[in-house]
Amino acid sequence: VLAGFADDPVAAQGRRSVSVTVKPGAYTGDVVLSPQSVTSINRASTVTVVGANGYFGNLTAGGTGEYTVTALVPTLGDATPGALTQNRLRAAGTAYPAEVRSIYLAVPDGALGPQATALLDRLRREVAGSTPYDTAAALVAFFRNPANFTYDTDLRNAPCDRLSTVECFATVRRGFCQYYATTMTVFLRELGIPARYVEGFLPGTRTNGVESVAYAS
């Protein structure tokens, strides 16, 4: 699927190949569902990429019914040569390609209001680590701490008219997955760490190798 593009996962280290058959139920969208980076799909599909070198955007496929995808998923720990560990991630460096910096450090105008700016300043002082990995891990812990934010799917009464997602989240300190992900992406970029936003589904229940993932339209 991504052969010849910048995000071609075949050359990536610390990953293993898995194949999954997807059987859509209530879901009727055309976005291909897959764990991590797709290497192949047994259905005609269209990949959208970003930038001159082709960084992955999304993958869509027409038709209905089940399909099978093969993907590369991370291998973690010291048992497997080349697998990802905290130390390897810390040592990854910051020599980002120019196009990565151009695309994934960009922040939309108006994303940061006064509350988001104040929160970001606090994170610079209290949370930012010595490596991109440490900073990202610390941000995850900060956002997950219920003393800082509350997961809430109902923001109908939130005073967020004309506020960006990030400014709203920093103001009311509650929100759902898109609020967490958008804010972390923007904050990482402001901290000089290229980041991009990924959408997906929460894990479902797994029985005998079959995982049922709930979908709400």
Image (cartoon, rainbow, N blue to C red):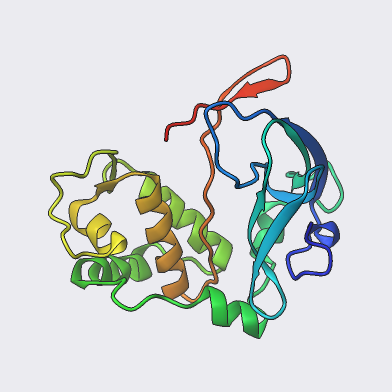
Location of residue 215 with respect to 114 vertically, above or below = above
Quadrant location of the C terminus in the rendered image: top left
Nearest the camera: 178 or 78? 178
Label tally: 0
Looking at the image, residue 122 sits to the left or right of residue 4; the answer is left
Nearest the camera: 202 or 64? 64
Q: Residue furthest front?
A: 63
Q: Residue furthest top?
A: 208
Residue at (63% x, 76% y) in the render: 94
Residue at (55% x, 42% y) in the render: 29
Residue 95 visible in the snapshot: no
Location of residue 165 with respect to 112 vertically, above or below = above
Looking at the image, residue 103 sits to the left or right of residue 35; the answer is left
The spot of residue 152 in percent (x, y) is 28, 39
The spot of residue 147 in percent (x, y) is 26, 43
Residue 111, by quadrant, is bottom left
Location of residue 117 with respect to 178 vertically, above or below = below
The spot of residue 95 in percent (x, y) is 67, 80
Looking at the image, residue 9 sits to the left or right of residue 90; the answer is right
The spot of residue 103 in percent (x, y) is 55, 77
Residue at (70% x, 72% y) in the render: 54
Residue at (83% x, 69% y) in the render: 4
Quadrant location of the N terminus in the rendered image: bottom right
Residue 70 visible in the snapshot: yes
Nearest the camera: 180 or 136? 180
Looking at the image, residue 67 sits to the left or right of residue 149; the answer is right
